[in-house]
Amino acid sequence: MTTPTNQFLKTLSTSKIIVILRNIKIDQVEEHVGLLEHYGLNTIEITLNSPDPFKSIELVSKKFPKINVGAGTVILKDDITKLSDIGVRFIVSPNTDPQIIEETLNRNLVSVPGFYSATEGFRAIKYGATILKLFPAGSNGLNLIKDYSAVFPLNIKLVPTGGINLDNMNNFLDKSFAIGIGGALFSENISLKDFEDRIKKIKLFLNI
């Protein structure tokens, strides 16, 4: 693994969660990310289908240098150069696209491609990915993690995402390196108080 990947995994091993901030607005970023940092949830993903995602990512990179900030829903190779320039540390895609994986690694960033089938998983591994996002994970994810863990190389880290919530998060964490949580934690109209309450509940479940 590359040094950026090792550092990313070291940071993620503490919180065990990639917090997905989909549709976050630029005027929400500072307060919401500040709460995440305060409570030790220090790996966040801002999706590119959010309003002003590049401005939001740049703000996090400058204001919160200790946060592992990543870009999600990355489907265009040309976006990766711009994201690298504004301080992104990892790139998450919803699918397995060799061009995205290779360009991410060429930029010395961490690649987290999405996959669902064994074919997609092995394709991602072939092109250099060592952290794979199982998506969507909610319905059959635990069975898939068990099956894939038996055949994927031992160095491959699985991060199930999609359909993860308070009811099933510990089951997924028992079987995988980390998890991605989006809608169960953040939604675009959530109040800051409700957001903090959800963070506290997750912290209790994680015992961190």
Image: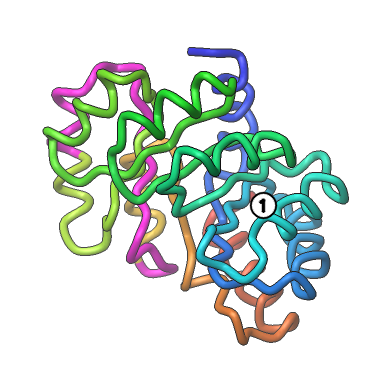
Residue lying at 74% horizontally and 41% vertically, measured from the top left: 86
Choose top left, top right, bottom left or bottom right for residue 10: top right
Residue lying at 36% horizontally and 18% vertically, measured from the top left: 128
Residue lying at 60% horizontally and 45% vertically, measured from the top left: 70
Image coords of residue 126 (percent x, y) = 25, 18
Element on which disc 1 rests: loop
Q: On the rendered structure, is 104 left or right of 135? A: right
In this picture, is 27 found above or below 62?
below
In this picture, is 55 found above or below 147?
below
Q: On the rendered structure, is 171 left or right of 46? A: left
Q: Residue furthest right?
A: 63
Image coords of residue 122 (percent x, y) = 19, 26
Label 1 neighbourhood size at 10 Å, few (<14), some (14-19), many (20+)?
many
Of residues 76 and 10, the one drawn nearer to the viewer in this rendering: 76
Of residues 37 and 120, the one drawn nearer to the viewer in this rendering: 120
**Magenta residues (range):** 146-167
Q: Main secondary structure of the magenta part?
A: loop
Kind of residue sitting beneath label 1: Leu
The residue that mark 1 highlights is 41
